[in-house]
Image: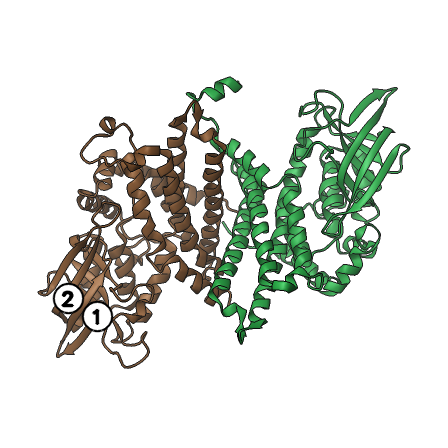
Amino acid sequence: MHTRLSDKDLAFQQEARHFLAENWDAELASTCSNWKTMKEGMLEWQKRLHKRGWMAPHWPVEHGGTDWTVTQSFVYNSERAAAGAPEAIAFGVTMVASVIIAYGNDEQKEKFLPRILESKDWWCQGYSEPGAGSDLASLKMRADREGDEYVLNGSKIWTTYAQYADWIFCLVRTDSSGRKQEGITFLLIDMKSPGVTVRPINTIDGFHHLNEVFFDNVRVPVQNRIGEEGKGWTYAKSLLVQERLSIAEVTDSKRGLAQLREQARREVNGGLCLLEDPLFAKRLTDIEIDLMALEFTELRALASIAEGKEPGPESSLLKLQGTEIQQAIQELRMDVVAYYSGALQGDLTAAQLGHEYADAAQKHYFRGRASSIYGGSNEVQKNITAKYVLGL
Amino acid sequence: MNFNLSEEQNQIRDSIARFVQENYAFDQRNAVVALEHGFSAKHWQQFAELGWLSIPFAEEHGGFGGGPVDTMVIMQEFGRGLVAEPYLATVLLFGSLLQAGGSEALQGEYIPAIISGELQGAFAYLERQSRYAMTDITTSAKSTDDKWLINGEKTVVLNGGAAQKLIVAARSAGGQSDAAGITLFLIDAASAGVERTTYRMTDGHEAANIRFNDVEAEAVIGKLGEGYALMDAIVDAARLATSANALGVMETLNAQTLDYCKTREQFGVAIGSFQALQHRMVDMFGACENVKSLLYRAVCAAQDNTDDARRSLLALKVMTGRAGRLIGGEAIQLHGGMGMTDELSVGFYVKRLMIINTLFGDADYHQRLFATLVNEPVASNSTSKSKAA
């Protein structure tokens, strides 16, 4: 039992640090953090990652991935988060690509994977529907077979960045006769297809990231179906497991917490630094201790994977605990900026407004409420852990 | 990086698990705790024969040369079975202090006696007024005619009734709360002037309040006036060990509670089918995994003596206390009326968790230390800081 890094891993750590120092600069960070310029910023960042060969580290080498070990992935991810750099937008490179690689045919791999690597296609995810949230398998969007095409009718909701997307991957219903998990098919759909419309959904955080996507007699060639008709649920489920692991965002929370401490250090209440306020210190350290535990829960899961074993039952907690920690950090950040947490910055500079974190604090708080809802709500996560881990 | 046990560590774990299975069923444990001093001398001899008493000691004294991971394995298994023998007091506290600060001659004489099971020891460091502050010491040590005379009272000395030898923290110099001026003394418990009042703790273990009236010390352990650094390091290792002990207790409590909820029927169904109860059991599982993760973190950091060692240890102690309260409370609640009885072992496991929380400082105490460690330095523009300085 030990957590030492090998010399090879330490050398890799230096390499990752060097790459991030050279490529993740303040200008790019600023472009990516403003939601109005986020798309161009992220595309530029992904191009830099691709140039280095690190756009899709988890892909097989033959498709443009790396041969990183689990430890190296962990090292890279820690360095990336410490530098404040984001991961590539997950919908393409992480989500749909995993399904295409695992279940797609050669033609689909050749058509879609290189374009994802080069960030030529922006992908979005069409799973939830107005009537299918936590109970995802009850989805109703119809796909009726007509010759070599499916004809789609229905709608998808909570579609993040649909307004930028070139393609959407959807779970659709091709059969309603059996169990609700059967009869679901996984389709890739060109967003430029006639009959696709996108309606923006305004959210409490003031960003535009969510949408509803409507499909009105949209025709999709059968070649765009992943695997077999009616097996989409199986394919999607493998993705959900991965999604739940990745949204723990342990390394990003570490950085968030470090920033929070620095912000609190600068705040003074009647002569008392906020860090010296015992009630504040209690809340801050509660979060830090939980996060230190979660960091090692994740390491334990990674160590299992590195040995070619399934991650242990503790991995079922990652999404649940990770999002609770993220939300606790966001809450405390609101409290750090005091009454400024209610101020809308608009076009004012931070200097004009009077505080540098005012806008970010409440936006992050409200946006962060989503994390315990998406990817299977935290209550659903508890149901899953009770059933599959505790055997209840 | 890996979290696997070595072949030897697995063997130790299996052999303790076998011992627990054969000797620590509910009724058997009750019988053991009812014995004089709250443990079985026969078991202790068995520990010696199986080599468990030798594990943390250096090979030159007949020890196994084990490290923090070995201790973790032992204490976790002891926790699973709620083993009552005084491994913490005699081996991990008394024995480790002797090894860290005793002269070669003392080590050569007493460590083999611990390993063979002949010698019981205890570490007397608390006083009535001290709460968790280990530097708060009024027991005095005065030097006269090449002898050290000890006067004062030590309280809640674990294994203080059975111990033949004591290591006592006394003040040879300095003010009541100074770290400097604390000296550790080896004292024979049968010496003239030693008065012991023994009592039981809720977990069945025996403790003692011990008065020292002009008691002559046998030897100084470590350097004069520098006893605090010595005891602090040994207590840190004991904090790790008791957290491992708590993890074993929590694992058993969770398993028992889960089992009960799967078999107990109300309203015509197993109560484990109710979502309100399922979510509580997920919280118990999560709390236990948090302790395990921080335990692995702190043990690995202690083994390699990394920068993260102190921070991880403090975090572990906080989590162990909090998770213990959560798991203990929920275990009783989910067992319903049966959880309130002495007819099931649940309550006994919960009592052990409550005791462990208080050992060497509770969760709040450690969280304050943690906050001081991670928040330093506080802002330079804070006036209270400059006032304090």
Q: Residue furthest right?
A: B192
The answer to whether residue B379 is visible is yes
The chain letter for the residue carrying disc 2 is: A
Q: Residue furthest bottom?
A: A177
Task: Look at mark 2 in the image and give the residue it sits on.
Answer: A215
Q: Is residue A49 above or below residue B144?
A: below
Q: Earlier in the sequence, mark 2 or mark 1?
A: 1
Identity of the amino acid at label 2? Phe
As rendered, which of A215 and B50 lies closer to the eye? A215
As rendered, which of A141 and A247 lies closer to the eye? A141
The disc at residue A141 is 1
Give the spatial CA distance, label 2 vs label 1: 9 Å
Q: Give the structural element (helix, strand or loop) at label 1.
A: loop
Instruction: Judge the density around disc 1: few (<14), some (14-19), many (≥20) Cα neighbours within 10 Å.
Output: many
Q: Residue at x 78, y 32 (%)?
A: B103
Q: From the viewer's perspective, tell me whether residue A310 is left or right of residue B4.
A: left
The answer to whether marks 2 and 1 mark residues whose Cβ atoms lie closer than 8 Å is: yes
Quarter location, residue A181:
bottom left
Q: Residue at x 15, y 66 (%)?
A: A215
Quarter location, residue B155:
top right
The chain letter for the residue carrying disc 1 is: A
Chain that the image shows in brown: A
